[in-house]
Image (cartoon, rainbow, N blue to C red):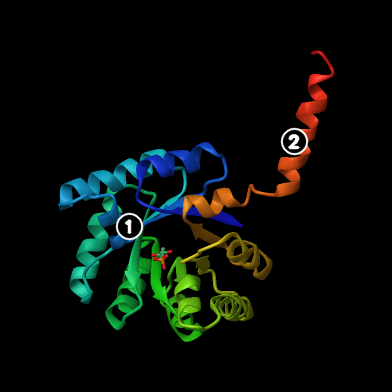
Amino acid sequence: MRFFVDTADLDEIREAQSLGVLDGVTTNPSLMAKVGVEGKDNIFRHYKAICDIVSGDVSAEVLATDFENIIREGEELAEIDDKIVVKVPMIKDGVKALRYFSDKGIKTNCTLIFSPGQALLAAKAGATYVSPFIGRVDDISNDGLALIHEIVDIYSNYLYTTEVLAASIRHPMHIIECAKIGADVATCPLKVITSLLNHPLTDRGLEQFLADGKKLNL
Ligand code: E4P
């Protein structure tokens, strides 16, 4: 399973990269707004700075909702760096744009996926990734992990190459369950990735080893 960090914060991305387990980054307009980047030039520079930190794919989302402008924005974003993946919303013109970008060899991430039917459409249109939002499905008392399961099953039935990028991950068990289901990628806030480190028996065991280690007079 690949790990992407779900943030636009450069310090967090550097920290995730320094762990040695990072495979890419996802951003969205809300995450970009959170770090306070404004204006096209600054935003493009920010995406470039992210690409310079990581070695894998970096999702950058279009704001347009009509075909012509999705294409224009997406082509501009793709020019920033080879690592850029154009993130396109699951709407009719978005699906048309996925096909266009796919035919041109531009990588895409179809976002705001909440049903297996949407994921099927995105795969048929040639999306590189689909982003089903686990946490937001859970928030409305449905089963976000069941959605991941359904999409993974459908893609495997027909050998679609579109990768399942599990998004809106809120806690470590989301990651573990996605790994058991076979999602290709999990995109998570840094604190959820680092929470995988935690186990009380590790803490207790280390404390004991360090206490006994002192007796060795090294
Ligand atoms: C990432 O690609 C998604 O935009 C993100 O995971 C959404 O997460 P949220 O539901 O916590 O905002």
Q: Is the CB of mark 1 within 8 Å of ligand 1? A: yes
Q: Quadrant for the C terminus, please.
A: top right
Give how far across and how far down residue 174 sits, in percent: 58, 66
Is 98 displayed left or right of 74 in the figure?
right
Q: Amino acid at mark 2?
A: Leu
The picture quadrant where one finds residue 12 is top left
Q: How many labels sit on residues? A: 2
Q: Tag 1's secondary structure?
A: helix
**Disc 2 versus disc 1: nearer the observer:** 2
Give how far across and how far down residue 9 sits, in percent: 35, 47
Residue at the (27%, 79%) spot, across then down: 93
What residue is disc 2 on?
Answer: 206
Q: Amino acid at mark 1?
A: Leu
Which is more toward the observer, 154 or 145?
Answer: 145
Image height of 31 relative to 49, above or below: below
Q: Tag 2's secondary structure?
A: helix
